[in-house]
Amino acid sequence: MSVDVKKMELTDNDIEKINKIQKSLDNLKNKHNKFLFVMPDVKTPNASMYEIYFHATIVKKMGYHVLILTDNVEYEIPKWVDKELTEFEHIPMSDNKLSVSPEDIMVIPEIYSNVMEQTKDLPCLRIGLLQSVDYMMNALIPGMDWSRFNVRDIITTSKEVRNLMNTYFVNKFNIKIYNPGIPDYFKSNDKPKKPIISIIGRNPNEISKVVKLFYAKYPQYSWVTFDPMLTKSKPPQPMRRKDFAERLKENFAAVWVDRISSFGTFPLECMKSGVIPISLKPDITPEYLYIRDEKTDEPTGYKENSGVWTEDFYDIPNLIGEVLIKYLDDTIGDDLYQGMSEISNEYSQENAEKNLIDIYTSYIVDRERMFENALPKINEKEEEKVIENK
Amino acid sequence: MNISIIIPVHEFNDNVSHYFSNAVESVMIQEELSELPKILIVHDKKIEKDIIGFVESQKRKYQDKLEIELLSNDGEIDFQSQINLGVEKVETEYFSILELDDEYNRKYFKNVIKYIKYYPDIDIFLPIIIEVDLNGNAQKFTNEFVWAQMVVGENGEMGYFNSDAIKQNSDIKISGSVMKKDSFKSIGGLKKNIKLTFNYEFILRAINNGLSVYTIPKLGYKHLNGRDGSLFNSYLNDMSLPERKFWYDTAIKESNFINERNIDLSKLYISEEK
């Protein structure tokens, strides 16, 4: 069989293929390829968009050319993301001049399963960025999954999500995990904290309900203010993340209600800021709450001093009251703040950057290997042709 | 310790002694302090013997830890005059007022020191006071309202008293407060001619004269209501509503003047039905 192959003559088509693969390999090795990050267009601050910009920035620092692909022509760069993270060329996906080569890498967030489908015939590597299982499932029709769109590689943010994926989509995906990083400007200081409670949630009705129930239960604390963490302008606007961090650390506690979160960035921001998170545990338990067995990697319990967590929504107003009383009476133990600091320190941007460099480097290395493996088979034919011509 | 505590005393009996011991104890058990505040008791000369006996018993109890000084006054034994007299004697930058039947929270001065460090420009720190009845049951908070955004107003900074905030709330108490001695004196101290609303008048005057007044958002002080013989208990028992209204209006008016003025009591309507 091998002899037959060697005796095959190279066609122009083969040579063209060789040249193309060689060019792709050269581009990849010389970092002349592109990374394309597809960006959702959500108008309110969200960890999802921030993380995509963060990934894009890390890849840019690695020396690659990065483009941000937007869903619509009128996309506005969000002001609440740090300016240094958004300094990219933003191109609408509908732009006809946009070209994609085999050496390019496209990162598509889970919300865009339609983009995964539309790009399934592109020659580049496409990676699914999975930050929310809920968004992923919302965007899929029953019976479908990303493998049907030739997306096999996934980056996600927790072991819990990976386990879910492996349970329901058995052996379909190669999943890499990284710990998102909380910027260092989320930090605690010794300055006395104010009797103000930040309140963040996905469902405004639930947020309103928590506040009303709290005031109903504790009319004597009607002077305590809940802070929706918006600018004080008229109308109020979402805050830049740095300003958000500055405001957050002034308050003594924060309420978080987000049932569909897959990671839980806000409680970590609180912990890093010395602010006690009072949270409804989401359907997917945040990874940072678990203690895991070193050998089996299975959860063996929950970490202590990670804030205040409940599985009962209607318990939240009571918990706010209990934490408030302790704050006013100054009986909150230092071990709580120490525990929160230890948990959140594991989620530094420095660590996230190292994680992501490893992950994206591994994709590059795999891609290089794939091109290199493709070349010899064709090169052997070329060598044979040269010999025959002699 | 850069803070002294002034305790004004105008009466003494077994009941007072019981509360007074608790008040002193609340100073002695302050936590996380390298040094305890010095206590200055300003008392009516007529009860000097009792006070000396009481202080000796306290010194036996706390030995070297208790630093206490007595200042006897004759004649003007009202709360305001005793405080003014005590301030004259104080040698520290800040002083606090402790009523003999009240108590500090055991972490109060730790917090005060922290707030002084971060807010050195503030002239008057007020605690959130929890007011209790004779059985120790909580009745209400005082001084807390400046932490409500809707009270301090859109442009007001939470925690700070401003004219908007005190227009809406006259229920302010300076017991437990920690003040800069110089700031207190710069606006003339407390006014003895004003009954019932002298706390309110003083804070109004402080604001009018540009002093910075701030509530430390901690339950720093427990105030006892309803004790026979206490000043405010007598006001509550004896004053009619029109009389209270008179003192409220007087406080607003007099807060425009630093100096103590004679109050025109001819306009004071005293109801026959008390």
Image (cartoon, rainbow, N blue to C red):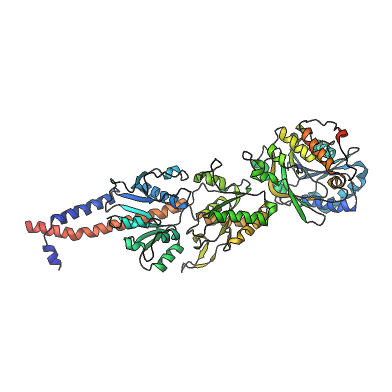
* Vertical side of B248 occupied by B225: above or below: below
Residue B162 visible in this rendered orientation of the protein: no
- Residue B184 vs residue A100: left or right? right
Image position, residue B113 (x, y; %): 69, 44
The quadrant where residue B196 appears:
top right
Q: Position of residue B97 (x, y in %)?
A: 78, 43
Give the image quarter of residue A322: bottom right
Q: How many marks?
A: 0
Residue at 90% across, 43% down: B272
User: Is A110 situated left or right of A30 in this image?
Assistant: right
Out of B33 and A14, give the one closest to the viewer: A14
User: Which is more toward the observer, A220 or B121?
Assistant: A220
Q: Residue at x 87, y 46 (%)?
A: B234
Quick check: B255 above or below B132? Answer: above
Instruction: Pick the residue in front: A50 or B110.
Output: A50
Which quadrant does the N terminus of chain B fall into?
top right
Along the horizontal axis of the image, is A270 left or right of B70? left
Left or right: where A317 falls relative to A94: right
